[in-house]
Amino acid sequence: MPKTYTTKAGDRWDWISYQFYGTCDLYKEIQKANPDLPIDLIASPILPAGIELVIPDIETPSTPEELPPWKR
């Protein structure tokens, strides 16, 4: 079940991704899960306070064989 997160002033997409998934690389998945956000918020690296985001469930690789070589 997807989670929700309410932004704080200065939050960044990559930071939110890291907090929920342990990697900065999945921020686009969070953006895709929030299609109703205005394009200027999607395009902005820094978010204002008070935006409620849907944080989708994403399976992240847990074994070294599933990770890319630079993350092993």
Image (cartoon, rainbow, N blue to C red):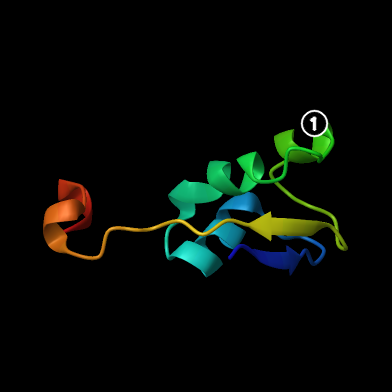
Q: Position of residue 66 (x, y in %)?
A: 18, 53
In what quadrant of the picture does the N terminus appear? Answer: bottom right
Q: Residue at x 38, y 58 (%)?
A: 59
Q: Position of residue 16 (x, y in %)?
A: 61, 61
In what quadrant of the picture does the C terminus appear? Answer: bottom left
Q: Nearer the viewer, residue 30 or 71?
A: 30
Q: In the visual, does 42 lie left or right of 50?
A: left
Q: Nearer the viewer, residue 71 or 1?
A: 1
Q: In the visual, does 38 lie left or right of 29?
A: right
Q: Residue at x 61, y 62 (%)?
A: 2
Asked which secondary structure carries label 1, the reply is helix
Bin the neighbour count of mark 1 within 10 Å (Cα to Cα): few under 14, some 14-19, many 20 and up: few
Residue 54 lies, with reference to residue 28, above or below; the image says: below
Disc 1 target residue = 39
Q: Nearer the viewer, residue 34 or 9?
A: 34
Q: Position of residue 69 (x, y in %)?
A: 15, 48
User: Mark 1 is on which residue type?
Assistant: Ile
